[in-house]
Amino acid sequence: MRKIAYIRVSTPDQRHDRQIMGLRDICHEIHIETVSACSARRPVYEKVLTLLKPGDMLVVWDLDRAFRSVVDALTEAEKLRSRGVHFQIATLNIDTSTPAGIFVYTMLSALAEFERRTLSQRTKEGMAAARRNGARIGRPRALTDEQLQTARRDIEGGKTAASVARELGVYHYTLSRSLSRQQMRIS
């Protein structure tokens, strides 16, 4: 039986070392992808699926490293099973080649989905509470109000917006957008 591992992290900032270390001794091949689980396309995952032959096993480190939702997890496991491909979650030692493995896999998929939805709900509630308390949510501003006032004076004094943007270390469109937002706040 050939064991092929699929490793996924959502962003380049996340490390996949833990997954690699856990899978390298039990798998014949390891394929790594950096993409959100919610992404419409996961090219590495799609490639791995084409490599799997009857009798092979797809191995993931943890349930949330491969699938988007409970429905997705169950659907994918069923597709693999219909092709004669087994599925293993290494951290839980779950193997879908057995009835007990399928049962445990189904239950854990439901729990993982519940956890994701609960975390999402808590995050949204926390952000709403922070907004009500006056907190600014989102990416920090690239330029301070003082920098924007100086930039506006420089542009009115004859400098080009592109040269002012370069001096501030931002892109031209960042400066233009920031100046527009500041003007809307003042008006």
Image (cartoon, grey):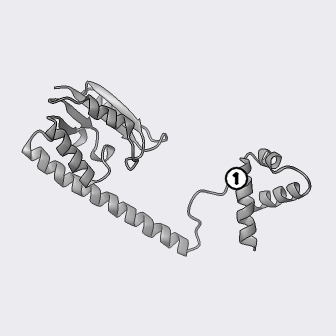
- Percent x, y of residue 148: 78, 59
**How many discs appear?**
1
Q: Quadrant of residue 7?
A: top left
Q: What residue is at 49 percent from the left and 67 percent from the top?
A: 127
- Percent x, y of residue 146: 79, 60
Circle 1: element type: helix
**Tag 1: amino acid:** Thr
Q: What residue is at 27 percent from the left and 46 percent from the top?
A: 63
Taking 42 as reference, is 139 above or below it?
below
Q: Nearer the viewer, residue 84 or 21?
A: 84
Taking 77 as reference, is 174 above or below it?
below
Taking 73 as reference, is 122 above or below it?
below
Taking 131 as reference, is 156 above or below it?
above
Q: Nearer the viewer, residue 170 or 147?
A: 170
Q: What residue is at 15 percent from the left and 30 percent from the top?
A: 54
- Percent x, y of residue 142: 68, 54
- Percent x, y of residue 173: 71, 51
Position of residue 70 in the picture relative to residue 103 (left or right): right
Give the labeled residue for mark 1.
174
Q: Nearer the viewer, residue 22 or 163?
A: 163
Q: What residue is at 88 percent from the left and 50 percent from the top?
A: 159
Q: Is residue 52 visible?
A: yes
Position of residue 97 in the picture relative to residue 143 (left or right): left
Q: Is residue 144 visible?
A: no
Outermost residue, left side: 99
Position of residue 65 in the picture relative to residue 76 (left or right): right
Q: Nearer the viewer, residue 2 or 162?
A: 162
